[in-house]
Amino acid sequence: MTAHDERIDTLLALALTFGMSAASDTTAHDGAQASGVGAARAALNPQMLSQFASLPESERQSVAAQLAHYKKLSHDAQERWLARVLIGVNANNATDHLDPHVHPTHIAEALREEPAQIQALILRQLPPHLADFCARTLNPTPLRDGTKNAPAKSSAVKSGNASGSSLKSGGAFSSSKPDDSPHADAPQRQKLLKIIRRSFLKRFVSAIQLPRPTQLDLLARSDLARLFRALGVREMAIACRGERQAANIAQIWRRFPPEDMRVFAEQMATPEEIEPRRIALAEEIIEEALSVDSDPVGVLDYTGLRLLSFVMRQRDPLCIAYTLQKLPADLSDYFQRMLRHAPLSSGDDLIPLLVEEVEVLAANVHRAARKAATADRAGAAHEH
């Protein structure tokens, strides 16, 4: 089963379960006996598909097709299908924790693809500052009936920090906050909320899923940006040892930010024997970077990303996804396009060396970040 098929099954199963729960609640409220068959029939009312109005047309069609197939099943077969799908959500390394390094823009974009009812339920269980960021990022648009998507109007979105600040470890979905519906304490409702959480969290990679994490994987979101820059500066220094790009680099390096200029000068003054083919690769990357961006800072960042793309292509898909989700969504898309570029001719046989270089720099960046954090804590303690 593909990821798309699994998503369609999960969306339909959740919609059916919502419908059955609502039908059972209504019947019980009227004082009648709620039967499984009656609830199932109520769940299949024509209005059910309106829950998916905010989905892309292709997904709405897939849900409708799967619903048509579901209706043809016997009652027992329907119950077995529903149980299988919902049990599957809880399997496959499902987790109740959102990795703290996921960039908030990825959470907002993932929510954009969910039906409005699920959007509202997820927003209720995010930390207030993150829920507020996601709700504002979604920019709800009018639905077909003229109403607005739920997130912007949800009372669950409390005012808070509007920035996409980093999440505390386990801060999102780590505990079940009570739902604010009249039936919040019903065991079935809590079970359903857990299934929704896990279904949503399967969109992201957690550190515990990574096979043999490396120094690169340990970097926080802000540390990744520092790594890109450090890789770019080093690549500039390597390219200067050749002849093809030395003149071009000489024209722009004095416009680097002060700290990058200092590091570049130090690396240029450090005697280091570098293979000609490694210098040729650096020259090729710089030539490409200069053709893409004329701003010195942009050239540095592009160079760092381009070099990292050589290493990332060789990594486990989970490790790639874990790094991509740390970047802002637009930069993540840009980097994915870069990963699909044809590799430069000089780089194929240098991959082991490039991996070593990246891991050494990642360890340095990680070490510097920990040192700075320790100094900040010491300074804060001294002030108090």
Image (cartoon, rainbow, N blue to C red):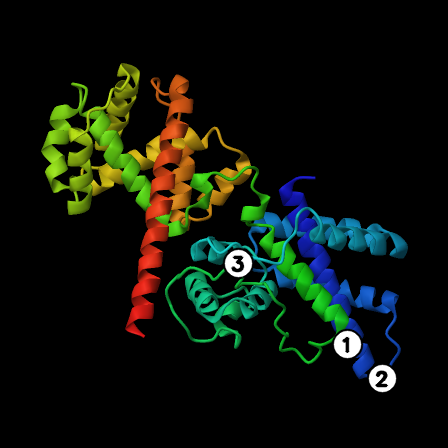
How many angstroms separate mark 1 from mark 3 (CA)? 27 Å
How many angstroms separate mark 1 from mark 2 (CA)? 10 Å
Q: Name the disc covering residue 315, or none.
A: none
Q: How many marks?
A: 3
Q: Name the disc covering residue 31, or none.
A: 2
At 62% from the left edge and 78% from the top edge, which residue is drawn? Answer: 180
- Chain-order first, disc 2 or disc 3: 2
Crowdedness near tag 3: few (<14), some (14–19) or many (≥20) residues, C-alpha within 10 Å:
many
84 left or right, relative to 96: right
At 50% from the left edge and 44% from the top edge, which residue is drawn? Answer: 322
Amino acid marked by disc 1: Asp
Image coords of residue 285 (percent x, y): 28, 27
SS label for mark 1: helix
User: Of 155 and 255, which appears nearest the observer?
Assistant: 255
Image coords of residue 35 (percent x, y): 88, 70
Q: Which residue is mark 3?
A: 111
Q: Answer whether labels 1 and 3 touch (C-beta < 8 Å).
A: no
